[in-house]
Amino acid sequence: MNNAGMKNAAGRIVARLLAIQIVSWGTMELLVVVFAPRLLLLDPSVVEGSAPLVLWGAFATAVVVVAATALVGRQVRPVLLELTVGASHVEPRDVHVLYDAPRRLVAIDLAGTFVIAAATLVTPLRPQTNDLYTQVELALLALTMASVAALPAYVTMRASVARVLELVPVAASREAIDLLGTRERRMSRLRRRLLAAVVAPVAFVALGASLLVHAHLRAFDTSSRQNDAAELAQGVLDVVDGDLRGTKAAIDASRAFGFAFDESRSAALFSATRTDDGQTVLTVPLTDGHAIARFETARLSPGTSVYLGLALVALAVAGMLGWRTGRAFADDVSLAEREIEATGVADVLRGGRIRGDARFQSVAALMSATDKLGGVFREFASAQQRAIDARAATERMRGLFLASMSHDLKAPLNAILGFAGLVARGELTDGQRESVAIIEQRGLELLYLVNTILDAARVEAGELTVSPERTRIGDIVMPAVLDARDLTAGMNVEIVGEIQPGAPQVIADPARLTQAVTAIILVAARFAERGHVLVRASMPASGDQLRIDVEVTGQGIAAADQEKIFDAFRHADRARRHGSLGLGPSLARSIVDLHGGAIDVETTEAGGTAFHVWVPSERGTSRS
């Protein structure tokens, strides 16, 4: 099931739980109605008289189910709302409430069924056709059927809730497990649940079997004693030729066998009724009047005792097997947990650490799945190792590339620039001198670009270093201005440098910091567009760092693009429009960062752009 499907399941879980209970308990009611007459050998009058009671019981059961679902649904509503919207955090206690929902529903439903069954024993609800013992048998049958229906209902509801619990974040699941206590306590809970899972069905079957045996024995005993009572009444109390001698002695002798007789001279039809105290009252018509026979019909026969003993033995055996099964399963789960926790990186990479030697198939499947997961990690580790090797090879190739670039590109460029300078010293026509000037200009630009690429690669590889020393700020700003003028010749951009009088020395690598300031000036020049760039070094009244301002007049750089110019190679359109924009500023920021300084950009009041390069000064060193 995908994530959207599980979220829909979370939203419909309460309705699903209600439907499961209605189906389960409705089936239970139907089974009682269909099988009770045959299983308990009920008289037709009892079946007919119990019809209104069945309807009342079904309605009361529905009310209990709906009330239980409403109560539990209200408790799980907060966590269901969080899971439906995909919340990243869920309270662990709310997870426990959702996890316990099926158990609580079954417990409430069974308790409600017990109350309803007990209520049917009360005279206002119990039909007149049902004596107390018959109604007790019906109630016990209903409870047995309800207990049997509770098992599939619990399993089905547990499966539905388990699908919803898959949406719980991993962190919340771990915290919820921790709330259960120590590992020994969790294993004890597991053993008890398996014990109940084994004993409960056996108890239901034993109760049902004992109930059926008692009902059949009681019906057989009642029928047999009823026939005996009818024959005794007709044989002893019926008058023969008007002779009543021996009647009283026969009645007294019958009491020793559990039969009490009264006679009446009025006429009556044959009938049999049962009282709440377990007696059957039998009316037998005679030649002259009728006889009333009373005898006990709720006796416990030896057969009932035997079946009750067998039921207790079955429960004891089931308890022993359930305890051993629960202990074995808990040991397997504990073994799997220990194996998984003990599995380290080396074990995962080696494979075969987790062995499927559990006695239960579900636990063995879990351990096998864990081993397969380890195989996935091994493949991932192998791919990662290949990536590491490839990266190392790339680093070696980059080192070779940097070495070859430094030699194969810079040497020819220096030769070209040197010969262009020699040619420029000779006698040249105006056209030739202009051509040589273009060669020198483009050569300088190309050399600057090559140096920028090489240094940027060194920054990425972590190989660029600086050697700070005390340096006058003028020895950094003015060379940078001159280099920028040479590189921007023909752009009609005026670059002006200013040094505040009395500016302190800076702690910097002169060559590298000059390179950084030059890169910033070139960025400003490309955005100046026929304006001018002002480079000014000053020391603020407060602070330990000297500031180099590079201001661009005119439109300048848009506020949204001011930080983007420092992202090398990420804005190809601007790089094509403004040369190597991005690589130079990125290198400049890296160099300044290595000095412990910073570069920031802001828009001036006139609408232009100002770069601020902060460099550590000797003022901060003297204070420290």
Image (cartoon, rainbow, N blue to C red):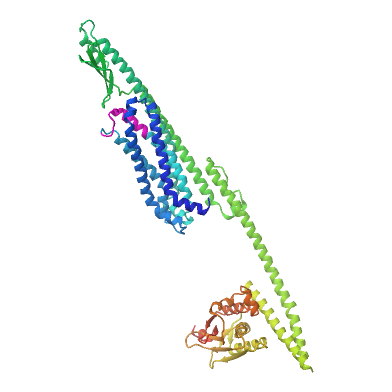
Q: In front: 620, or 407?
A: 407
Q: Is residue 15 visible?
A: yes
Q: In front: 272, or 519?
A: 272
Left or right: residue 564 compared with residue 118: right
Is 2 rendered above or below residue 451? above
Q: Is residue 305 visible?
A: no
Q: Please identify the quarter of the rendering in which residue 422 is found.
A: bottom right
Is 612 rendered above or below residue 381? below
Image coordinates of residue 196 in percent, x first then y, are 42, 39
Is 63 rendered above or below residue 540? above
Q: In front: 56, or 87?
A: 56
Q: Please identify the quarter of the rendering in which residue 591 is found.
A: bottom right
Image coordinates of residue 14 in percent, x first then y, are 41, 48
Image coordinates of residue 343 in percent, x first then y, are 55, 52
The magenta stretch spans residue 422: no
Left or right: residue 108 compared with residue 481: left
Q: Which residues are magenta?
A: 124-142
